[in-house]
Image (spheres, rainbow, N blue to C red):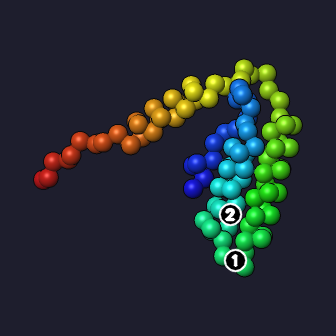
Amino acid sequence: MCRSIKTLFNFEPPATEDEIRAAALQFVRKLSGFNKPSQANEAAFTKAVEDVTATARVLLDSLSTTAQPRDREVEAHKARERSRLRFKPRPAGRAG
């Protein structure tokens, strides 16, 4: 679940509110163990997502770096390559 939370700092263009909210939603899902909360927990879940989204926005706006902003396309290509290598089919072993 948390693998789908992407780094959002130091990209050009900056992270959108939708990207920040998506990361917050994944974080709250991981903490709560709920993919979709029950009606009894829905208000608390929704408030947590809103709070984490707001806090993440404050964090991203407060951070600074001297590094050049990263390119989303380049980083996406690197991630695809890491995934390809990670899930590369292995040759069948010999029975023995």
Mark 2 = which residue?
31
Q: Amino acid at mark 2?
A: Leu
Residue 90 image offset from top left, x and y in percent: 28, 42
Mark 1 = which residue?
39
**Up-down: is 55 above or below 73?**
below
Out of 65 and 80, give the one closest to the viewer. 80
**Up-down: is 61 above or below 73?**
below
Query: Furthest-bottom residue in view?
Result: 40
Q: Quadrant of the N terminus?
A: bottom right
Q: Residue at x 78, y 62 (%)?
A: 48
**Cα–Cα span, label 1 and label 2:** 18 Å
> Please, what secondary structure does the residue beneath circle 1 have?
helix
> Please, what secondary structure does the residue beneath circle 2 have?
helix
Observer-side mark, 1 or 2, equals 1
Residue 35 image offset from top left, x and y in percent: 60, 65
Residue 5 image offset from top left, x and y in percent: 63, 47
Determine which quarter of the picture holds residue 88.
Answer: top left
Q: Amino acid at mark 1?
A: Gln
Side (left or right) of 94 relative to 1: left
- Residue 51 is labelled as none
Side (left or right) of 42 relative to 74: right
Q: Do residues under tags 1 and 2 come within 8 Å of each other at their CB atoms?
A: no
Determine which quarter of the picture holds residue 40.
Answer: bottom right
